Amino acid sequence: MATKILVAVKQVIALDEDFEIRADGKDVDADFFLRDLNEWDDFSLEEAVKIKEAGGEVEVVVVTVGPEEADESLRKCLAKGADRAVRIWDESMEGSDSQAIARVLAAAIKHEKPDLVFAGVQSSDHSFASTGIAVAGLLGWPHAAVVNQFDFSLGATQATIRRELEGGVLQMMNIDLPAVLSIQLGINTPRYASLRTIKQAAAKPIETLGLGDLSLNAAEVGEVGSASRVRRMYIPEKGRAQMIEGSLAEQAAKLAAIIKEFKGATV
Amino acid sequence: MSGILVIAEHRRGELRPVSLELIAAAESLKASSGGPVTVAIVGPSPDTFVAALKVTGVDEILTLAAGSGDFDPDTQAAAVSAAIAARSPSLVLIPHSVDAFGYAAVLAAQGGYGFATDVFKIESDSGAWVATRGGYGQKVNVELDFPGKAVVLLTVRAAVYKPAEGSSNPTVTALPVPNVSAHVRPGEYVEMSQADDVDMTAAEFIMSIGRGIGEEARVPQFRELADAMGATLGCSRPIADSGWLPKSRQVGQSGKTASACKLYIAMGISGAIQHLAGMKHVSTIVAVNADPGASIFSVAKYGIVGDIMEFGEELKTHF
Amino acid sequence: MIDSLSITRTLFEDFRPLAVTIFYAIGYGAIGIFLWGTWIQIRKYRYGTAYAVTGTLISRFKQMTGTMLTHRTLVRRDHAAGGAHALIFFGFALLFLGTSTITVEYDILKPLTGMRFWYGDFYLWFSLVLDVAGFMLGGGLVFMMWRRGWLKPPKLNYARPDRSPADPDYDRSGYRIEDWAFLWSLLIIAVTGFVLEGMRLVWLQGRPEVWDYRWWSPIGSAFAVAMRDLGLGAETAGTIRSGLWWFHGLIALAFIALIPFTKVKHIFTASASLMLRDPLAAQRLPRVPDSQESVGFSYITDLNWKQLLHLDACTKCGRCHEACPANATGAPLSPRDVILSLREFANKTLASGALPDQVELDIHGKSPGQVSMETLWSCRTCMACVEICPVAVEHIPIIVQMRRKLVEAGDMDPLLTKTLQTIAKTGNSFGESKRKRGSWTKALATPIKDARKEPVDYLWFVGDYASFDPRNQKVSQTFAGLLQEANVDFGLLYDSEQNAGNDVRRVGEEGLYDLLATANIEAMKNAQFKTIVTTDPHSFNTIRNEYGDFGGTFEIEHYTTLLRDLLTSGRLEVTRPLGYRVTFHDPCHLGRFNKGYDAPRDILKMIGCELIDMKRCRDNSFCCGAGGGRIWMPDPVGVEKPAQNRIREAAFIEGLEVYVVSCPKDLTMFEDATKTTGNEGRFVVRELIELVREAVASPVVLEAPVEQLA
């Protein structure tokens, strides 16, 4: 039987220059949104595709929760080697936080029955660093966060992982399968998806699922199903460094003086 | 539901300093919470950490004897869950650490708690908790509230609150932890490959390079500059990930903390939050960057806008 | 009076009929082997993919004949070798025509109609011409031997920059044996021909119809007279003549038989290659049809038949090897080696009637005959190789097609990967917001029109570097000021403009190129203008030569021609002739690619500069190293970069004040190189636009004249 790896991905939002906050003060004006596949998800998808390419019967399914614009990111995943792409959306999911998204993903996992679930450690936009692990909590699955090495053979009931801790320390761990792993940058080198393969991937179908398909109800998702609610969003006042002005030579001389003064003080 | 529960963290037998920062945060919120500050510590012999946790503001220490001494998410979640059940706090504070990445979200999902991560500001607005965190790659601040949630669980960013000091005389209570079968078995620790034996944590003067240097070919020039100035050469994550400098020179959350550093020159580093975590405490930070809007300037004492290649060459003439 | 009919050469004189039959049998055998070999080559080419020849065959034939008769491509940058080749070529051609003439009379006309013409005056002139031809051939061959054996030009050293001495295919020593065998065999044929002629004269000295007319074969008779004076008798000469006749004949026949199997085949393949020349081979890269499943070249059979033929046309002359900027700076690339490797690969895999397994056909890698990815990524697509190749081998399309496969597989430098992703996301290589493309115009006193909103005469396509690089932004601002002063009606596409795609295409990211070109074409079509103008030669090339394939045919000029017109017509007036001693760097994409050599030089003259050209100028200009996407790839540490090599060349010019460029990337590359080669302070790098500004400026606007900076 084929091993199925489900990779949860997100289309993240970067902000364009000189962005503005929306009139209601709860989000940034969508005009300034630049969408792209989350950087971490590139790595988790690559890890799954590498397992597939190592041989054996492996199916890689990417799943995202998001509106139609997210198809673009899913096509990128298909171009990079995912076998199937599933997009889950319902208007009631608008405003979901990481916990609500986790609920949807958990339902999708019950529906897809994968043998392994990968998620990125965090998203580059809101960086909750919690969606994947919340999914594990909802499913009661074994889980580990910030994995930067994964050794596994098809059909095994356990795998060896390595977590990346703070301060340049790594830790080896042994984990029961099936499991949910949050994947850290640097675990592999994600491949480049050429624009042509992305275009070709457009021919592959993207499956779409709604609330009903996953036996969810509207109260479990969206803002009402979330563990937090946005009260206000604002651009923080930044502390400013004292700028050293002048010509290049003057600037360098000033810094050299600061350095020399510091060294004089320490010697 | 009242009071604040702080989850202290330890690794390899040492209490992690962030634990004391969270106690300080809890202490500042104690009045709003209307209850005591309780600190919970989980481990095979939690008592060893009790003395270190008797700092100002702590009303009670819960010791939860469980696990092997190394973090595993299942044991930790079960123990913290037991502590929450026992004390019914309205606010639970957990360090925003790699360990917490592994279990905080599980607790929130299973307990239906209010939940936010990487929080750097906590307030109470008419009895309701309000947490502030960054959004859109730290370009905005987001204020969150938690309507209808009796318990709010927050993971708190390190190096935001000053560690609690002083002493207190809290009650110490041992709390039983239900037996769980851990699905994850911790193994040995590995230090990141040490291609050279530099100790970033001990360096007093560091010059770090970031993405702004553009290409690997330019690394030697900066190495020469650092040598000439007598600085230790460090880098941000992208440089280490590209293999341009060994991992041991990486400053930041997943690299080294510039603990002993007093003068830090950031060349072409934009100032991602992960990097700032390792250096923003340094008393004199000088940032050189082509982008006047780079967030590194918000933590730097001195800033220079300009081409780091040209600037580096010019600076070298002084040494 | 001797009957003119007897003034001829009796063929097979004194041969027994059996001997003649044997000779004919061997002759037919040789021709049979030749035909069989030719078929093997044609069969090899037929394994290639389809290629539709454009234009009429007659015009192509004329063009090829013209090139061959003038030896135009062969004498370039190597007059001596070109001249010697002309001697060999014309000598050989005349000898071949002579032999054919005899065949026409003896084997066709005479047996069929009894008609003869090879006698009398015709015969005598024929003898004289062929003697001269033989002398030319021999002379050319001897020169080539001297060149190979004593002069030893570096370009004839086949040692490969992409292999190490330990590799079996490092120095291609097999080719050296073939080179010498070729020269010697032709020389032996020529010399034995003359000796044979002399022996015949000595042998037949008693016949006045032979002996009296001997000086019509001057070399043969000089030899005959000498031998006779040395005491060689008629009978002995006859014997030697018989033996030598067979020797000469057999070598000549063997030579013919071996043509398809040796370098001699370039007689045919080079001609065909010249005939199939695509004058825009490097300027306009092949489009991938939408229906095509895969992209780029993975297997030898992905090359089209014309390209397989090009491989066989290469004569290893080394002109491309010498011109290549990658090779000159130690990169593991010589265009010649790419062609030879693929040729060897094709000969090995496509020689039989059946194809080997597909895995055997993979041309990517490091085994003999394969081309490595390091080699492919070293190419700057500067067109120096294609431009100088005397036999019209088109290297760049092959290299780019192979790169397309590398891009597809993601086998590229991480920095390049990142840049391509950035361009896909933001439409520019700087990763700047689309909104900021027009930000540089904010510094101008008079705003620039938005060509999307109002009609303009000139649509200025700015390009990435001129839009986002701070140094080049200043040049853009200066150019805008000049246009405004000259009252030129112009506008921009602002944030509707994206990277033009020239370099993206040359990297091999065809899908991204398609996207960029299509988006730009759509934006251009939505604007109203007469002509496009650009300061960027890269954008200039792709819009001029490639957008047409994507449905965008526009009139475009490089700023140098526009500025020249403005200066000529007096709309810009030179008020301050500069008097600088300058040199000019021809940008690849303006010069070689689009033959824009003269406008910048005319401008320099008009603004009063003294132009001293570098040795490598115009068509032989030396790439700055940024082309083909190399600007997005790091150069190896500690090795001279092409731009440094170039600046060192310029530094030889005595009293040089300004190194003039007319390309944004050049400005970046050469300002860098001036610093890193220690030439800062000796001379400065300036955009031509900046010099024009200085020459037409009133003192108020004059910002930083060259002399203050130098």
Image: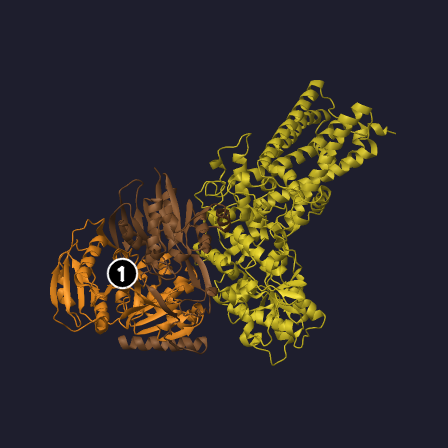
Callout 1 crowding tier (Cα within 10 Å): few <14, some 14–19, many ≥20: many
Judged from this view, the residue extending furthest toward the bottom is C700
**Depth check: B28 or B247 in front?**
B28
**Depth check: C302 or C339 in front?**
C302
Which of the chains bears the disc numbered 1?
B
Asked if residue B67 is positioned above or below residue C108 in the image, the reply reads below
* Residue B300 image-quadrant placement: bottom left
Asked if residue C20 is positioned above or below residue C216 in the image, the reply reads above
Q: Locate residue C407, reporting x and y percent.
A: 48, 49
* Type of the residue with mark 1: Tyr
- Which shade is chain A? brown
- Which shade is chain B? orange
Colour-to-chain, yellow: C
Give SS at disc 1: loop
For the question of whether residue B96 can be seen, the reply is yes
Q: Residue at x 46, y 61 (%)?
A: A34
**Depth check: C122 or A2 in front?**
A2
In this rendering, position of residue B190 left or right of residue C76: left
Quadrant that contains the C terminus of chain C: bottom right
**Residue at the disc numbered 1:** B113
